[in-house]
Image (tube, grey):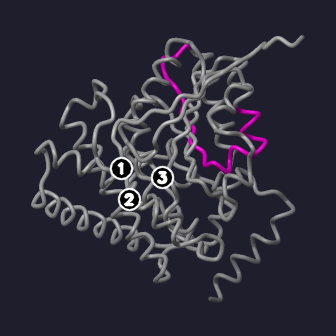
Amino acid sequence: MQTPVATFNIYYQQFLNPEGQLTQDLPDFAQDPQHLLHLYKTMVFTRIFNAKAIALQRTGRLGTFPSVEGEEAIGVGIASAMEPNDVFCPYYREYGAQLLRGVTPEEILLYWGGDERGSDFKNCIDFPFCIPIGSQILHGAGVAFAMQLRKQPHCAIAAVGDGGTSEGDFYEAINVAGVWKLPLVVVVNNNQWAISVPLSKQTAAQTLAQKAIAAGFEGLQVDGDDVIAVEHAVRYALAKARRGEGPTLVEAITYRIGDHTTADDAKRYRDVAEVEQHKHEDPMLRLQTYLVSQKLWDDAQEQQLRDEYQQQVADAVERYLAIEPQAVNAMFDYLYAELPHALEEQYHTAIEAAGKL
């Protein structure tokens, strides 16, 4: 005779469907028209910035850049739910969250600059200084542990792509977060593709949210193209964490419309028809449709907003391009407090070579 010893359910939530229609009553925060407008405007700014960054890369003025087109709701929803003293440990596709948290467009461009331009990031706490695949979840667990030890009412949020959930770092982090009941929220941006590997070929799990169950805490799933659903889920998870009830994993379902990065060509491994099928799920379009239906937005406001944001992004690009590249020795100076003896020859060779350019 066999007796079940454990069962679980994963619940999915959505407030706005792809047609911009409500599927259930809005949560309290989303009943404020100004809040919804702020979410929409931030997503618009993020997309305009994203398009400009890609154009800069294509013209040789920016390094390899990962597009966030069609995934803006996740980053914006995360940041909108956070308190000022919470800490965000992002991965490389959450520009909406970084912009909303105070990172400037030129700082993001500096990171992807592809040269040795200035590195004085004043908003560094929410900025990815590396290109993490799963290690940022460990960072988030560490930050959350520090908050717990200090008895601070703050939380850490770590974002990761679906591919990152197949990494050992991810499992180590969620395991310790569950054991220690850390004030950590893990948000998985499930855009269906880990570069060229589809979700079906990297995991046999029915959902990514259920991976939290093995670590002893709650996992839930939301429509990642519905910014209201994302913010609602993150708010819920943060409130739990502040009460000392431990971590939560939020799986946000979306789709990667563009290439993995500007160094990728997704047409080599992905059917164009599949991409077209997902374009109608656009997070900006669905919220815009709802706002228009509520007479909170119109075409004239849309055009004025886009003109204003195009100019703001253009100004940020000018500031970025005006920054002088740093000296070649900066790559050593910013990495080591004291230069290791083994690198001294490389250090002097690099400086000498730069002087001959």
Badge 1 element:
loop
The residue carrying mark 3 is: 121
**Which amino acid, by three-letter code, is at mark 2?**
His
Mark 2 / mark 1, whichever is N-terminal: 1
Residue 133's place in the image compared with 10, above or below, is below
Q: Which of 196 and 119 is in front in this view?
A: 196
- Determine whether label 2 and label 1 are within 8 Å by CB: yes
Q: How far apart are marks 3 and 2 (CA)?
A: 37 Å
Q: Nearer the viewer, residue 145 or 6?
A: 6
Q: Which mark is residue 280?
A: 2
Badge 2 element:
helix
**Which amino acid, by three-letter code, is at mark 3?**
Phe
Badge 3 element:
loop
Q: Can residue 355 be seen in this view?
A: yes
Number of residue marks: 3
| Residue 334 image point, x, y percent | 64, 56
Q: Residue 174 carries which label?
A: none
Q: Which mark is residue 18?
A: 1
Give the residue at the far right of this rendering: 1
Asked whether, in this view, residue 322 is left or right of residue 135, the answer is: left
The residue stretch that appears in magenta: 151-173
Q: Distance between the residues labelled 3 and 1?
A: 37 Å
Q: Does the magenta stretch include residue 160?
A: yes
